Amino acid sequence: MSIEVISRRSGSFVQRVQVASFDELLVDVPALVGGDESAPDPHDYFDLSLGACKSITVQMYARRKGLPLAGITTTVDRDDSDERRGSNSEYRLTVSMQFLAEEGHELDAETRARLLEISERCPIHRLMTSTRVSVTSREAPASE
């Protein structure tokens, strides 16, 4: 699968992203570094991918187990104060999840604990915490 990021010289850092046949996504940077703050920044997309994946993983589990889960509110808090320190820096994410039961039902403490445990099995959590990611950058041939 390819994701295409298109940047045009316009005095702006806004990037247009095309993923499969979905509507275009936009990426920008904070005003502090010269952006317009017109869209989420790359860190936001990194963080939100973790929150969304955890929620989806829990929903899939709850559906498979027939649990009365009506919804989930997932909050991802970022502490990037140490990020630029060098090779031993740390980018810290804290994920808080609120599990909402269907009307007339409850989710007991044991079930909520299990849902939280299941959330740590999401593919993005595993990718971020236990997989070595390799990135290769190369110049693409000019299109004709």
Image (cartoon, rainbow, N blue to C red):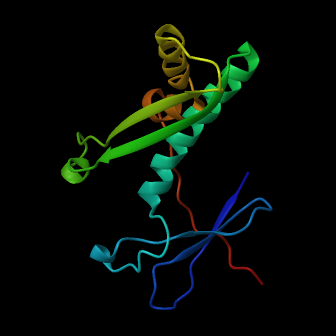
Say whether residue 126 is left or right of residue 83.
right
Q: Residue furthest bottom?
A: 10
Q: Residue furthest right?
A: 21
Q: Position of residue 63 (x, y in %)?
A: 73, 22
The one of 139 and 80 positioned closer to us in this rendering: 80
Say whether residue 82 is left or right of residue 62.
left
Say whether residue 122 is left or right of residue 41.
right
Q: Residue furthest front?
A: 104
Q: Quadrant of the C terminus?
A: bottom right
Taking the spot 45% from the left edge, 56% from the top edge, the residue there is 44
Say whether residue 69 is left or right of residue 50.
right
Taking the spot 48% from the left edge, 64% from the top edge, the residue there is 40
The one of 100 and 13 positioned closer to us in this rendering: 100
Q: Position of residue 133 (x, y in %)?
A: 49, 39
Quarter assignment of residue 49: top right
68 up-or-down from 40: above or below: above
Quarter assignment of residue 118: top right
The one of 133 and 93 positioned closer to us in this rendering: 93
Taking the spot 45% from the left edge, 79% from the top edge, the residue there is 13
Q: Position of residue 143 (x, y in %)?
A: 74, 80
35 up-or-down from 107: above or below: below
107 up-or-down from 59: above or below: above
The one of 6 and 121 positioned closer to us in this rendering: 121
Taking the spot 49% from the left edge, 39% from the top edge, the residue there is 74
**Count of labels shown?**
0
Quarter assignment of residue 111: top right
Q: Position of residue 77 (x, y in %)?
A: 35, 44
